Image (cartoon, helix red, strand yellow):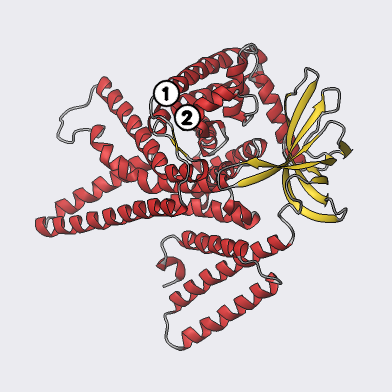
């Protein structure tokens, strides 16, 4: 018996070990991590040999050795990353000079005066000079705010800049302080251009063209355009404070950030298009991969979007490789891939939110679906075909129950994180997502049709932009009404970390106890009935439920 046959999901254990090693490397970095990693691997090899000599099963020795090697690899990689100076070596409030390259798509906002503009972008710092006038090498992305004049040339991705300003603290969450740099219009100098990746630069140009195309025919509806561009392209800087507050109080602010929801909608629309073209599903990944990767890069490549993109590519590549899709393995593979290239993402709020909520959806949604399935499952004792109205009603009930289960599972797993990081409890989110998510899907669908058909003929963008604007007006109306509900959003000052861990421990215990209880009840029923028909009926029902859950 090999290791892979004795472990049902080896990637889950591997990513847990690598994540634990990353946490140890961040908390207890060690010098000369490369030599330590090599020594650890040699020690593991020696331990394997000793275990085999004492009669320990080979598959167990290999399994534990693999986990230990992965943990040590994560520890060493994070320690090396720490030694190369990933943290900003200048205190907040101190003047600083930074030379670096613009690493994302700069966005502009109106300045304090009519002829001023405020640019916000991320600067990949290469050299930093603080108050001690010593040049320090650095490898970190610094959020930057540049108060510029509209006559000055705009910054672009790949520009190498020299900026003089002050490091300021920025609020990213109660337990996740951040920093940013603020500079005046005469404090930034463009040293040279076109230092970025040509593929990413092309994606950013396509993103800017798409934002202009979404304004055709609805240019006077600025509030709607701001929400539409945020939903499709990730441009959130034009959303007013009032609209943002409505989404915050209703717990639906997540739809304005490019995440797994948006990547999933894009993947669904592309798959429907390929299905209409009658292309074999085996080769879908060849066409979907460049489109999904380009969309993820163009919208900023956030952790949630990267996670969704990797999971979608793994899902669509399974038929090509002749493998079956497994949600937990796909989630683990995406987490491992992100942590290998960027280990410190483990401590990012977006990374934590994305993976914990998706893990909750994978584990809890099947339970809620099984509870709600009697509401839409057809009657097995009914004779004759069903009418069209009844079939339509069952389809609508099935989709509504699926939406309820997804919203409930997401709310149940995200509540402790929202309380801990942002100090807010939003009971309205449990019901708000039932209306907001379908409307967001319709807006994204209309916007995609506008972009695709408008690229062929500009006039075709107008009707779809109008439809997207109407759905956006309905979306804003729903959020305004729900934000005014009493006790829809409650502020909590301090929510300890121990309560967060206890919350997830209770969920895990509930899932474990329920699984064992169902197994015990199933064995008792089979022993009591002792019928082959009962066994077959149970298997058929389980296959039917699994098929509907995958759909």
Most foreground residue, 60 or 388: 60
199 horizontally vs 339: left or right: right
Which numbered disc covers residue 273?
none
What kind of element bears circle 2? helix
State the residue position of label 1.
482
Whether residue 408 is situated above or below residue 464 in the rendered picture: below
Could you tell me which residue is drawn at 61 percent across and 64 percent down?
25
Quarter of the image for residue 190 reads top right
Callout 1 secondary element:
helix
- Marks 2 and 1: in contact by CB < 8 Å? yes
Task: Looking at this view, name the residue that lies furthest to the bottom.
Answer: 53
Q: How crowded is mark 1: few (under 14 residues within 10 Å), some or many (20 or more)?
A: many
Which badge, 1 or 2, is on the more N-terminal residue?
A: 2
Question: Residue 138 appears in which quarter of the rendering?
Answer: bottom right
Write the residue at 35% across / 38% down.
405
Separation of marks 1 and 2 at Cα, in angstroms: 8 Å
**Residue beneath label 2, please?**
249
Q: Is residue 375 above or below residue 364?
A: above
> Where does the C terminus fall, quadrant-wise?
top left
Percent position (x, y) of residue 399? 35, 31
Looking at this view, is 178 or 472 the one in front?
178
Residue 538 in view, yes or no: yes
Q: Which residue is drawn at 37% across and 55% down?
A: 505
Quarter of the image that includes the N terminus: bottom left
| Relative vertical location of residue 18 with respect to residue 129 in this rendering, above or below | below
């Amino acid at each position: 018996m090999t290791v892979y046959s004795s472990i049902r999901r080896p990637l889950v254990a591997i990513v847990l070990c690598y994540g634990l090693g990353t946490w140890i490397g961040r908390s207890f970095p060690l010098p000369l991590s490369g030599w330590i990693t090599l020594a650890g691997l040699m020690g593991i090899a020696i331990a394997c040999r000793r275990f085999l000599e004492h009669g320990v099963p080979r598959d167990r020795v290999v399994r534990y050795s693999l986990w230990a090697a992965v943990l040590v690899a994560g520890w060493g990689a994070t320690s090396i990353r720490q030694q190369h100076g990933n943290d900003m070596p200048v205190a907040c409030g101190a003047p600083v000079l930074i030379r670096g390259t613009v690493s994302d798509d700069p966005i502009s906002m109106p300045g304090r005066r009519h002829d001023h503009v405020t640019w916000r972008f991320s600067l990949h710092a290469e050299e930093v000079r603080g108050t001690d006038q010593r040049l320090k090498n650095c490898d970190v992305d610094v959020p930057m705010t540049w108060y510029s004049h509209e006559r000055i040339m705009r910054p672009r991705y790949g520009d190498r800049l020299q900026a003089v300003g002050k490091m300021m603290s920025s609020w990213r969450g109660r337990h996740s302080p951040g920093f940013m740099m603020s500079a005046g219009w005469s404090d930034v100098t463009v040293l040279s251009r076109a230092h970025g990746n040509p593929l990413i630069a092309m994606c950013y140009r396509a993103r800017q063209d798409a934002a202009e195309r979404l304004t055709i025919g609805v240019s006077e509806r600025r509030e709607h355009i701001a929400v539409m561009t945020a939903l499709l392209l990730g441009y959130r800087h034009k959303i007013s404070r009032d609209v943002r507050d409505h989404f915050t109080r209703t717990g639906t602010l997540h739809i304005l950030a490019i995440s797994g929801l948006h990547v999933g909608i894009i993947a669904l629309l592309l798959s429907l298009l390929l299905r209409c073209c009658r292309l074999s599903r085996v080769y879908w990944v060849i066409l979907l991969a460049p489109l999904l990767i380009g969309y993820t890069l163009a919208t900023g490549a956030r952790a949630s979007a990267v996670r969704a993109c990797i999971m979608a590519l793994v899902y669509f590549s399974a038929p090509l490789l002749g493998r079956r899709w497994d949600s937990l393995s796909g989630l683990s593979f995406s987490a491992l891939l992100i942590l290998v290239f960027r280990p410190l993402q483990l401590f990012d709020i977006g990374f934590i939110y994305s993976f914990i909520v998706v893990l909750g959806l994978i584990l809890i949604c099947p339970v809620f679906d099984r509870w709600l399935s009697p509401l839409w499952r057809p009657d097995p004792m009914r004779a004759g075909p069903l009418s069209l109205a009844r079939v339509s009603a069952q389809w609508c009930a099935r989709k509504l129950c699926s939406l309820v289960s997804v919203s409930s599972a997401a709310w149940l797993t995200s509540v402790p994180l929202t309380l801990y990081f942002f100090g807010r409890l939003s009971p309205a989110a449990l019901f708000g997502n039932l209306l907001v998510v379908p409307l967001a899907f319709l807006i994204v669908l209309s916007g995609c049709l506008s972009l695709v058909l408008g690229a062929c003929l500009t006039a075709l963008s107008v009707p779809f932009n109008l439809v997207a604007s109407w759905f956006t007006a309905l979306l804003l109306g729903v959020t305004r009404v729900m934000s005014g509900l009493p006790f829809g959003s409650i502020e909590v000052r301090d929510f300890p970390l121990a309560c967060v861990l206890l919350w997830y421990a209770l969920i895990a215990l509930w899932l474990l106890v329920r699984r064992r209880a169902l197994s015990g009840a199933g064995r008792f029923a089979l022993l009591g009935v002792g019928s082959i028909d009962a066994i077959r009926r149970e298997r058929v029902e389980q296959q039917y439920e699994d098929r509907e859950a995958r759909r």
